[in-house]
Image: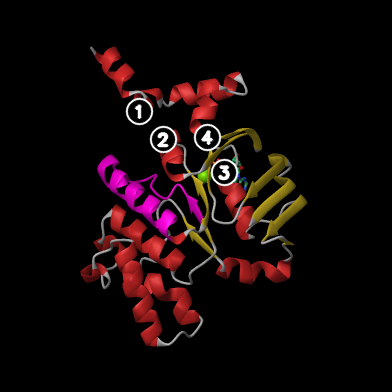
Amino acid sequence: MIALEAVCKSFSGQPVIQGLDLRVDRGESVALVGPSGCGKSTVLRLILGLLRPESGIIRFDRRALTRADLLSVRRRTGYVIQDGGLFPHLTARANATLMARELRWQPEKIAHRLAELAELTRFPVDGLDRYPTELSGGQRQRVALMRALMLDPDVLLLDEPLGALDPLIRFDLQRDLRAIIRRLGKTVVLVTHDLSEAAYLGDRLVLLRDGAIEQQGRLVDLQAAPASPFVSRFVAAQRTHLVDEPSRAQGAAR
Ligand SMILES: Nc1ncnc2c1ncn2[C@@H]1O[C@H](COP(=O)(O)OP(=O)(O)O)[C@@H](O)[C@H]1O
Ligand SMILES: [Mg+2]
């Protein structure tokens, strides 16, 4: 569904993505992880066409992206960022339905789709006429998710969608997001710096370092057979063993 082939991107002469090869199959959910500044958000912006690579090819549904394809790719892609990126002067309803109204969908079709999405994202219907500042952080992210799903895109790009939420709300949204990903079968590229979230939401983890893949696989692969000392340090720093091996964690606590 998505392929990056030897993609390079720099900002002001500073290389940020360095010969990146990444494939995401249709229906697969891939989690991009890595230290801050390693290029995770840049990868999503390249896939979305918000940035153009200096060299290399980005394919969407096997077609190499050209400028002419960008609009159709954006319509086939839902994008959610950390703070939701909602328009503050629009209600939840207006934010979520923006693209559909732009495309002149019939009002009944929009209302039907919105009701469906409110149920899917477990967003309270009485919150639809509130403005973003009148919603909680978790509710705002549910609106951002509704907006991203409105046109029923093939691909979802999620850039630390739960990064700004407190742990309990984050826990609920992780569970709901996982159910949504599984139920809809979308192709998902998710950025997170939380390894256990990556393992919970992604079929595969891709660990980036300085704009190149350091290692990819399941979390257990990274733990059991780290490809480099960097991978070991990155995994150890998150203490995911406390999550994966509760008995050992309890033992250590005693
Ligand atoms: N539009 C931009 N202009 C200049 N530098 C940028 C821009 N976007 C990102 N960068 C730089 O590129 C690097 C990677 O950024 P980013 O992809 O946002 O990292 P991550 O999402 O992994 O934290 C960082 O050093 C960042 O400062
Ligand atoms: Mg980022």
User: Few, some or many C-alpha atoms within 10 Å of disc 4 (few <14, some 14-19, many ≥20)?
Assistant: some
- Residue beneath the point at 29% across and 67% down: 131
> Magenta residues, as a range?
157-183
What separation in Å lies between label 3 and label 2 (alpha carbons)?
17 Å
**What predominant SS class does the magenta segment belong to?**
helix
Q: CA distance from mark 1 to mark 4?
A: 15 Å
Question: 163 and 108: which one is in front?
Answer: 108
Q: Earlier in the sequence, mark 2 or mark 4?
A: 2
Q: CA separation, marks 2 and 4?
A: 11 Å
What amino acid type should be assigned to the residue bearing mark 2? Answer: Ser
Q: Mark 1 packing: few (<14 Cα in 10 Å), some, or many (20+)?
A: few
Under tag 2, what secondary structure?
Answer: helix
Q: Position of residue 20 (x, y in %)?
A: 70, 42
Figure quadrant of the C terminus: top left
Within 8 Å of ligand 1, the CB of disc 2? Answer: no
Of label 1 and label 4, which has the lower sequence position?
A: 4
User: Coloured how?
Assistant: secondary structure
Type of amino acid at the residue the image marks with label 3: Lys
Residue sitting at x 30%, y 13%: 252
Q: Looking at the picture, which amino acid does disc 4 mark?
A: Arg
Q: Position of residue 34 (x, y in %)?
A: 54, 35
Contact between marks 3 and 2 (CB within 8 A): the answer is no
Residue beneath disc 2: 196
Query: Can you tell me whether the CB of the residue at mark 3 lies under 8 Å from the nearest atom of ligand 1?
Result: yes
* Residue under numbered circle 1: 243
The residue tagged 3 is 40
The residue to which callout 4 is attached is: 218
Q: Is-magenta flag for residue 167?
A: yes
Q: Position of residue 65 (x, y in %)?
A: 72, 62
Residue placed most toward the observer, 84 or 254: 254
At mark 3, the secondary structure is: helix
In 3D space, how far apart are the residues under numbered discs 2 and 1 (Cα atoms)? Answer: 8 Å
